[in-house]
Structures are given as C-alpha cells and as structure tokens.
Image (tube, helix red, strand yellow):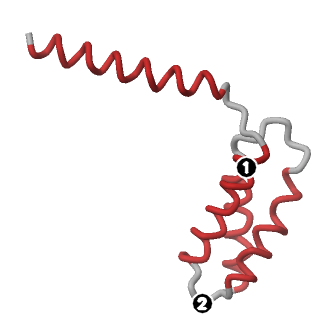
C-alpha cells in the first residue's frame, strides 16, 4: 500500500516538473540568458580568484559573440562559460 502511494506521489511530482518544462518549451529568452551569463561570471570569478573580476567579465564578453547567431539559445551560457574558462586558463 505504501509503495503504491509512493509511486503515485512520484508520478504526480514528475507530472508537475514535466508541465513546468513544457510550458517553457525549451526556449531561453534574452532575459533568462542574461541572467545565466551573470551567473557564469560569478561562478568563474570564484573558480579564478586571482583573476580580477573585470577580466573575468571581459573573458565572458569576448566568448559570447561566437554564439550570437545560434538559433537555439538554451545552451549558449554553457558554451560561453567553456570559452571564457579556456581564455582564463590561458591568462593564469
């Protein structure tokens, strides 16, 4: 009986998560992307504490134009982070 209740609860929770994701439809708007890029800068500043915050932001800014024409924006912050991280490693 408890197992059935647990399964029902999990299905209900998964349904709520799925509904939330499908409402978003996998499309990141510019505001979401800007917010994610700000989080990238914060994360990289923590990973590279010896690099001034201005240089971290500049590395991110230099990496972002590479993906300006990408039609699906969801992964742009991830790719920008990887590019900026490579630039910062070259500086360190």
User: Horizontal placement of 25 versus 62: left or right?
Assistant: left
Image-based side of 38 in relation to 18, left or right: right
Quarter-of-image position of residue 62: bottom right
Relative side of 15 to 85, left or right: left
Q: Position of residue 87 (x, y in %)?
A: 74, 74
Q: Which residue is mark 1?
A: 33
Mark 1 nearby-residue class (10 Å; few <14, some 14–19, many ≥20): some
- Residue 12 position, x and y percent, is 35, 17
Asked whether the residues under the numbered discs 1 and 2 touch, taking CB atoms below 8 Å apart as contact, a structural biologist would say no
What residue lies at 85% left-to-right and 42% top-to-bottom? 70
Which of the two labelled residues, at mark 1 and mark 2, occupies the earlier sequence position? 1
Q: Residue 90, relative to residue 19: is it above or below?
A: below
Q: What residue is at 26 percent from the left and 13 percent from the top?
A: 8
**Location of mark 2 (residue):** 50
- Helix, strand or loop status at disc 1: helix
Q: Which residue occupies the foreground of this view, 39 or 63?
A: 39
Name the one closer to the observer, 75 or 53. 53
Q: Answer above or below: position of 61 versus 46.
A: above
């Amino acid at each position: 009986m408890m197992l059935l209740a647990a399964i029902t609860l999990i299905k209900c929770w998964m349904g709520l998560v799925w509904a939330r994701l499908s409402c978003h439809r996998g499309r990141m708007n510019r505001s979401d992307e800007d917010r994610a890029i700000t989080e990238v800068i914060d994360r990289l500043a923590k990973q590279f504490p010896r690099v001034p915050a201005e240089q971290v932001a500049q590395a991110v800014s230099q990496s972002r134009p590479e993906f300006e024409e990408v039609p699906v924006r969801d992964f742009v912050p991830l790719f920008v982070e990887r590019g900026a991280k490579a630039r910062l490693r070259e500086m360190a």
